[in-house]
Image (cartoon, helix red, strand yellow):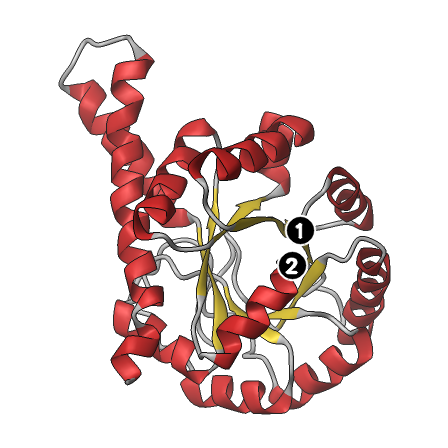
Amino acid sequence: MRLQEKFLELRSKRQGILATNFYNFETLQGTLMAAKSMDQPLILQLTRSSIEYMGLPVAFNLAKSMLEYHHVEGWIHLDHGDSYELVKECLEIGFDSVMIDASEKPFEENIAITSKVVQLAQQYGANVEAELGYIAKLGQGKSKGAFTSPAEAKEFVEATGVDALAIAIGTAHGFYDSEPELQLEILSQIAEATTATLVLHGSSGVPAEALKNAVDRGICKINLATEIKNIFMQTLKSSLSSSDEIDLRKVFPKATEQITELVKEKLEIVKNTATLRA
């Protein structure tokens, strides 16, 4: 099943799907063990930094083989693709989905860049995600910009033909200084105005109830990255500070297990949204 078809299925049920970034074998293993144990689908995400760290063929084939090994229904997605060239490389190697992030460009330029990627991705049958509005990236001020305009979202989707749209409704990448307040009314208006699959970036640290409400109002794809990196590194630091163990095969599994527990908690939130409304 193509990711676009999965999105349609989930949206018809007003359910969401978790999209998790991975950075090495351990972070990938931890997320897939969670999805396997709960029999839940998963989107595996790679950024430019992770691709450059692992190498594109290695990262892609690792994800593909691990999905098959664990018998998890999943898709491989380029997160925050920053150039047409990177998108093309990912599509050529077999990515199911790509994101082109031109959100910091002027509106018309964002449309032009996204339209070009959509045209390219159609040759591969791949899903395309774009971003509209200000969702602060790591190192950027979280109090800066504007929420996504429902009217602009409608215009953007109609002009580009994009499949999925990451929107700014109060979240940000990285951890928060205080609990974020999601603009749920704006979300509802965007969901009413456009047919695109709506994406929530920056879910790390967002309370479970807020995530459930976001899915109920129209969010379908929920991205998770920062909490995965954090729990892996914090567990490693704790283990190494109290041990002289040098065998990484004994040290890493403890951190991997913590990722599995974290992702299970997030999958439970996504899984139970429809049940809680019933």
- Residue 148 placement: quadrant: bottom right
Dots 2 and 1: beta carbons under 8 Å?
A: yes
Instruction: Name the quadrant of the N terminus.
Output: bottom right
- Viewer-proximal residue among 262 and 240: 262
Tell me which residue sits at (19%, 28%) in the image.
238
Tell me which residue sits at (69%, 86%) in the image.
154
Residue 192: x and y, percent? 57, 91
Q: CA distance from mark 2 to mark 1?
A: 7 Å
Question: What residue would you read off at disc 2?
Answer: 2
Q: Is residue 96 left or right of residue 73?
A: right
Q: Is residue 122 left or right of residue 214?
A: right
Q: Residues within 10 Å of mark 2 (few under 14, many from 20)?
A: few
**Above/below status of 235 relative to 150:** above
Determine the secondary structure under disc 1: loop
Determine the secondary structure under disc 2: loop
Q: Residues within 10 Å of mark 1 (few under 14, many from 20)?
A: many
Instruction: Name the kind of residue labelled 1 in the image.
Output: Asp
Tell me which residue sits at (48%, 75%) in the image.
219
Q: How many marks?
A: 2
**Above/below status of 244 relative to 220:** above
Residue 183: x and y, percent? 43, 83
- Between circles 2 and 1, the one closer to the viewer is 2
Question: What residue would you read off at disc 1?
Answer: 96
Residue 134 seen in this snapshot: no
Q: Earlier in the sequence, mark 2 or mark 1?
A: 2
Q: Is residue 75 left or right of residue 244?
A: right
Residue 65 seen in this snapshot: yes
Residue 210: x and y, percent? 32, 74
